[in-house]
Image: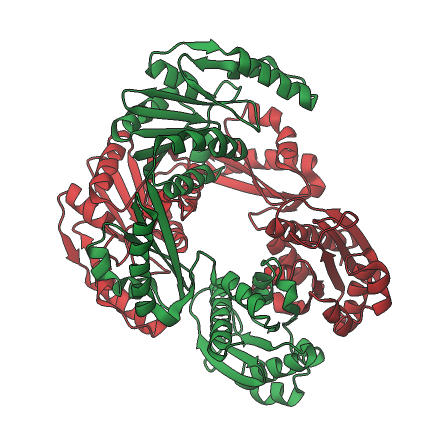
Chain colours: A red, B green
Amino acid sequence: MKCEIISVGTELLVGDTLNTNAQYLSRELSLLGIRVIYHTTVGDNPKRLEDVIKIALERSNLVITTGGLGPTQDDLTKEVVADLFGKELIQDEKVKEDLLQYFANREFVMTDNNLKQTFIPEAAEILHNPGGTAPGIMIKEQGKTIILLPGPPREMMGIFEGAVLKLIKKDRNKLVVSRYYNLSDIGESAAEDRLLDLIDVQENPTIATYAKMGEVLIRITANGNDEKVINGLLDKYEAIMIERFGENIFTFSRDSLSEAVGKLLIEKNVTIATAESCTGGLIASQLTEISGISKVFGMGIVSYSNEAKQKILHVSENTLLKFGAVSPETAREMCDNLQKISGADLAVSVTGIAGPEGGSEEKPVGLVYIGLNYKGNTKVTQWHFKGDRKIVQQKTATKVFHLIRKSVVDKGE
Amino acid sequence: MKCEIISVGTELLVGDTLNTNAQYLSRELSLLGIRVIYHTTVGDNPKRLEDVIKIALERSNLVITTGGLGPTQDDLTKEVVADLFGKELIQDEKVKEDLLQYFANREFVMTDNNLKQTFIPEAAEILHNPGGTAPGIMIKEQGKTIILLPGPPREMMGIFEGAVLKLIKKDRNKLVVSRYYNLSDIGESAAEDRLLDLIDVQENPTIATYAKMGEVLIRITANGNDEKVINGLLDKYEAIMIERFGENIFTFSRDSLSEAVGKLLIEKNVTIATAESCTGGLIASQLTEISGISKVFGMGIVSYSNEAKQKILHVSENTLLKFGAVSPETAREMCDNLQKISGADLAVSVTGIAGPEGGSEEKPVGLVYIGLNYKGNTKVTQWHFKGDRKIVQQKTATKVFHLIRKSVVDKGE
């Protein structure tokens, strides 16, 4: 099946918004064995929108649009598609009811323009939107399928992962199964290098690598008609992955490193406390994105100033004066004292220079010390991260999670 | 001038790569007053590539491609375009010299396939690539211009900011100016509702709204030949924006709310400290994304457990037992005590239930108390946020920044 993704919205064409929807849909559809052969982006202009939909329907069997389903004047996708297929827009009572409920739940006053979202092209299938007001819409005619999804990524994904996935799976009966291996502490090209022999001859299963800051996700996808055969294939490849990447694999899922580490801490019941300077709360904040983390995480300190380092973490004035705030000595006192204050099994500290200001020849931007006290053993490591402020902060957080995982896995709980 | 951007590469269609090039070019071209009306993405397939270039040349005056100029077999853009225009590819001695120099400088061994990059369509203009091996190429024929740029973002940008910008500026002299108004505490549809009379008749300037979690960005763009006339138009609209959105406008720029608040605190020299429970460090982390924030932000506490609330923030056991951790009383003690510990002008505290666990009938998921002590005056407010864990955390942080801004702006510094 050939698919085209059409993104609707002038904000994309003026560069205000990055088109993450097209990437998300492309990846998900590829996983399902559906070939995406074009992406098109068009503004909130009915004539041009009509033209691109016509072109797409000529060259693809499945067309998915995102954007232009909302309540405002320039939301036109549904109207253009209904016109193109010669369909009336009819108010749907169930959609209206859901909409009123949505606003009632939020104690928002509903402006009248919202009702526009309750009109659906006749004979179209309504795709429930679990996280917003505009439902998705599917129309099937003459061997072509067009699916209209809203533009806000969360709503688009919510409909895709629910209603759309169900429809696609019903439509085809080939099985597609993927397994994931998420690696840290290895670059993408190095990871790919170790897989070249497999990638070169890949057919079934296929192998893909995705790089994110400090993480490399490997996806192995097999398809067929028999689940047993598929899993046999995947087992064979899994053995190869473990052999080639053993210690780098931090999770056998798509979980990010921080998620995997949070779950590991919960599972092993290892309590943790954080003391952050240059990451400013990023590590604590990533930990607390994980539901249930309160079981093992109770205390985080953002000791941005020297005063906070002294007052809350009792770092000695002498250490700060003699070695400076960004030093292995300060990192060590931060985590050792934090351990005493919190009583946590694992206390981690970070002090560094995120930039762009504050660097010197001796202590350049990107210099970071990470202290880790696990069950009484303290280790301080020094790092040099490249990139702008946000990247240095993110890379530091990723490295901290990597070190936490290593400590807990190596020493057992 | 109408422009279309064509991105070439199968990695985009399978979702391996996010198309940041299209966004970058769109933004830069819009700023120059060139209207981008389509983005198209196509794989490394010569027939499809030819088709989309043909369509683009029909509907646009300027076509910019990115990708497919490199040394490998599947880099085909130059070949397809040369074919389409009936041009021979001729080896360019200067480009060859640059290429050999590039490898010599890096002490890399040059593989032979690199020489492919030295062949240029006859009569084309060569656009110097300051950061890579494949030069950009421009062909002008019959009132149409096509510019071929390489895919790696740094190389693409290097050529754009150098050779391409020079060509475009030489070509035109129309001015385009945009102004931004970023609003909080108002929904997108409500904001647009107040602008409908202007949007309905818009021509010059044009108005666009963009929604992000808890923020609505309005952009007003005017064009013309005379800077004074343009600014006069924009001044008139600015007065209308202030009249209609006054207190909702948190910045006259594209800065996010947290950035705007951080800069405000730095400018007014208002020192701040944070005590977070359910947001787990998110507020501190957003503050410390801002360069220079150390001038006003020294201390943040993530008091996730009751123990941390007692030990670090000295919340009384009695308060926690009698009213619970998620209560106005706890929020008040958290910020009042934090103020004393930190000595900050403004101390903010957050306690709530981010979910999905931990809710009850009396205290449901999404219930959040925000305490704000500014110059000795404490105010605690209660909120109910809907959404999943991450959304509740994000909405809480946004609300905190909104309240901080209001306090500082209302009371002056």
Answer whether residue A342 is visible to the viewer in this image: yes
Q: In this rendering, is residue B78 above or below A113?
A: above
Q: Is residue A29 left or right of residue A344?
A: left
Residue at image point 64% right, 36% down? A241
Q: Is residue B206 left or right of residue B296?
A: left
Q: In this rendering, is residue B20 above or below B56?
A: below
| Foreground residue among B291 and A213 | B291
The number of numbered discs placed on residues in the rendered structure image is 0
Query: Horizontal and vertical percent for residue B13?
Result: 42, 34
Based on the displayed image, in which of its 4 quarters is residue A133 positioned?
A: bottom left
Answer whether residue B279 is visible to the viewer in this image: no
Q: For the C terminus of chain B, which image quadrant?
A: bottom right
Q: In this rendering, is residue B51 above or below B88?
A: below
Q: Is residue B59 left or right of residue A185?
A: left
Based on the displayed image, in which of its 4 quarters is residue B28 positioned?
A: top left
Query: Horizontal and vertical percent for residue A251?
Result: 62, 48
Residue at image point 15% right, 56% down? A90
Query: Horizontal and vertical percent for residue A151?
Result: 35, 51
Q: For the N terminus of chain B, which image quadrant?
A: top left
| Foreground residue among A229 and B62 | B62
Query: Horizontal and vertical percent for residue B319?
Result: 61, 88
Q: Is residue A346 left or right of residue B96?
A: right
